[in-house]
Image (spheres, coloured by chain):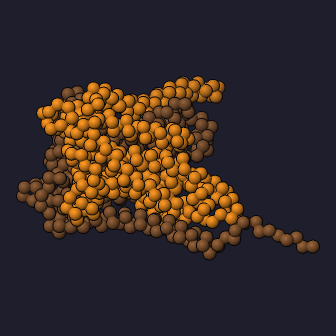
């Protein structure tokens, strides 16, 4: 009477084995993540270890003495910090202005058929290797700064001390700022664009329905509403500019001095490392250079951490 | 009466406001065009200057000493391929596992920490990561090596692979996974045989973008792979690298070397553009994000 039932699976499954494989798989994935965290920790610790001799020799003095002199083994990073910050600030002012407006255009004004390819092209700018930017900066931009842009700015804005000149070489703090601006423009544009798009449609509709023009809506409602995220984008771009190495090295002139003029050669933390590391002799010299790297690591860790937290709070979904 | 007066007052004002709106739009359009125009300008310049210097011997010969004509960057091209290849072999499986972790374990303090560190790591200057590779892998053995460059590159690729593979796996509908589990597949089989294959195009996109990010990266190579004027295929020894050759040729005072720098730059830019366009347009047309 009772129908004899055939088992559906042809061979019996070894559930213990399957459970063991599952467990091993999840454990492997978990361990990979733990190793990743360890790697980042190790990145920091190895840099500390490498810069230990210099940390001991100079202590905090390293940060605010201004003699970078390998011959006498005196290493103070102040001129390098100055060059790094000022070149990045020039870049941020230029790229921030252009990038935010470009993002507003791509997100708000441009029709879809234009916004898509234009945004893609701007983002491709981020893919250009920095050595190519440096090459172009050295042979095209630097002569332009020396012959046209520099004299023009001195002529028109010469009453501002930083534009007082004279322009001696094309490689200068200002040239580095220009190249950096180019390199961080895609970062500012792409992230600001996403932030602006993430602002809901209701704000826009409310503004338009109250009679504001499209421009007024963007300038007085949408951009102010997305200011936290745009600030995050700017900070992120700042982090990129601070640590950029090769392009800056090729166009900044590489002289560890603090000069008021933007058209004087300068030096950055990263470009000192790039230029001097392979020729450095002596434990203190090498470890001073590694300490510059440690400084860069700490600064960009803080800057990027801040930027990510800002962006995470703005974007409802994680970026 | 009062109403008509106000009416005319606003209509003059309105004309001004509309003009301002148009002007504002044009200014933003100009800003967006600046970015695109500059890319085209740079690409055009590199293409022009590069094509004049690129030739068969440039692609197939070893560097010539200063003063001698000809010579090429063949060892640099091969060296870059090897270094990036090893980096990919390290970073791809490891990054995918971490991406799986983020997708499977979701929220909680540990995944959030991993996510945060990954995002922060993507912003750490490549030169600092190069120094890390130096202290970790070069200083103990007292000589430069391609493998240390690969380690630095892998570190640079990890954040990209991690986050793109997480997103790719997350974008596979939950129901697909649940369906697989309901049919009796184990967690392992459901993930590796159903979910990951479904997410493969997006994972490949991330991988290609990660490769594009390190191809052409120069700063960490200075004190890891170091460069070499010879043929060397042993990754435990210093190895020639194309980006390094472009860098040293560019800042050299010799005209012939500077021309070779342009040719090398052209190769780099072509490689990076091909990788980017393939990743974004061919593999995954919908995804235009970095």
Whether residue A273 is visible to the viewer of this picture, yes or no, is: yes
**Percent x, y of residue A153:** 24, 31
Residue drawn at 20 percent across, 31 percent down: B70
The one of A191 and B269 positioned closer to us in this rendering: B269
The one of A202 and B128 positioned closer to us in this rendering: B128
Q: Chain B colour?
A: orange
**Percent x, y of residue A255:** 15, 46
**Percent x, y of residue B162:** 46, 56
In the rendered image, the quadrant that contains the N terminus of chain B is top right
The one of A266 and A33 positioned closer to us in this rendering: A33
**Percent x, y of residue A76:** 15, 58
Q: Residue furthest bottom?
A: A16
Residue drawn at 63 percent across, 25 percent down: B4
B246 to B126, vertically: above or below: above
Q: Is residue B86 left or right of residue A82?
A: right
Instruction: Give the chain ID for the brown colour.
Output: A
A15 to A270, vertically: above or below: below
**Quarter where residue B105 is shown:** bottom right
B104 to A213, vertically: above or below: below
Residue drawn at 27 percent across, 62 percent down: B137
A4 to A191, vertically: above or below: below
The one of A186 and B251 positioned closer to us in this rendering: B251
**Quarter where residue B235 is shown:** bottom left
Residue drawn at 61 percent across, 27 percent down: B7
Q: Residue furthest left?
A: A72
- Total marks in image: 0
**Quarter where residue A176 is shown:** top left
């Amino acid at each position: 009477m009772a129908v004899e039932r055939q088992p559906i699976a042809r061979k019996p499954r070894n559930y213990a084995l399957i459970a063991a494989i599952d467990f091993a798989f999840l454990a492997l994935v978990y361990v990979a993540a733990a190793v990743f965290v360890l790697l980042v920790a190790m990145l920091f610790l190895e840099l500390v270890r490498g810069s230990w001799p210099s940390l001991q020799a100079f202590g905090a003095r390293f940060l605010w003495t201004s003699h970078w002199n390998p011959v006498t083994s005196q290493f103070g990073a102040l001129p390098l910090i100055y060059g790094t910050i000022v070149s990045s600030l020039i870049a941020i002012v230029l790229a921030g202005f252009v990038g935010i407006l470009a993002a507003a255009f791509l997100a708000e004004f441009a029709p879809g058929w234009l916004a898509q390819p234009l945004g893609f092209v701007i983002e491709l700018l981020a893919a250009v290797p920095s050595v190519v930017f440096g090459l172009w900066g050295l042979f095209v931009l630097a002569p332009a700064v020396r012959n046209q842009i520099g004299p023009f700015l001195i002529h028109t804005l010469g009453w501002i001390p930083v534009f007082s000149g004279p322009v001696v070489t094309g490689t200068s703090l200002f040239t580095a700022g220009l190249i950096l601006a180019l390199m961080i423009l895609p970062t500012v544009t792409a992230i600001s664009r996403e932030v602006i798009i993430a602002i809901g449609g209701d704000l826009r509709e409310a503004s338009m329905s109250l009679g504001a023009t499209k421009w007024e809506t963007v300038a007085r409602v949408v951009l102010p509403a997305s200011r936290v995220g745009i600030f995050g984008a700017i900070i992120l771009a700042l982090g990129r500019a601070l640590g950029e190495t090769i392009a800056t090295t090729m166009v900044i002139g590489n002289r560890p001095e603090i000069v008021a003029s933007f058209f004087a050669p300068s030096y950055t933390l990263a470009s000192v490392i790039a230029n001097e590391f392979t020729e450095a002799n002596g434990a203190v010299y090498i470890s001073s250079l590694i300490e510059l790297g440690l400084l860069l690591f700490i600064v960009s860790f803080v800057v990027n951490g801040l930027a990510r937290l800002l962006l995470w709070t703005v974007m409802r979904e994680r970026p | 009466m009062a109403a008509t007066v106000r009416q005319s007052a606003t209509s003059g004002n309105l004309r001004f406001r509309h003009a301002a709106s148009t002007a504002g739009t044009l200014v933003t359009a100009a800003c967006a065009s600046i970015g695109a125009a500059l890319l085209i300008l740079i690409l055009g310049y590199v293409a022009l200057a590069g094509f004049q210097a690129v030739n068969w011997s440039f692609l197939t010969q070893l560097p010539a000493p200063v003063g001698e004509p000809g010579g090429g960057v063949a060892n640099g091209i091969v060296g870059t391929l090897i270094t990036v290849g090893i980096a990919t072999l390290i970073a791809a499986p490891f990054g995918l596992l971490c991406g799986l972790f983020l997708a499977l374990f979701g929220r909680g303090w540990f995944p959030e920490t991993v996510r945060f560190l990954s995002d922060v790591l993507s912003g750490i200057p490549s030169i600092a990561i190069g120094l890390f590779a130096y202290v970790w892998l070069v200083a103990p053995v007292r000589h430069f090596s391609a493998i240390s460059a690969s380690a630095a590159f892998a570190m640079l690729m990890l954040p990209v692979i991690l986050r793109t593979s997480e997103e790719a796996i997350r974008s596979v509908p939950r129901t697909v996974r649940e369906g697989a589990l309901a049919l009796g597949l184990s967690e392992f089989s459901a993930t590796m045989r159903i979910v990951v294959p479904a997410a493969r195009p997006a994972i490949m996109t991330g991988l290609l973008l990660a490769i594009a990010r390190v191809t052409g990266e120069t700063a960490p190579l200075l004190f890891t792979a170091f460069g070499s004027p010879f043929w060397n295929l042993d990754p435990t020894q210093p190895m020639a690298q194309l980006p390094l050759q472009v860098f040293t040729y560019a800042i050299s005072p010799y005209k012939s070397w500077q021309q070779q720098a342009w040719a090398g730059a052209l190769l780099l830019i072509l490689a990076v553009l091909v990788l980017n366009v393939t990743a974004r347009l061919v593999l995954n047309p919908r995804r235009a994000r970095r």
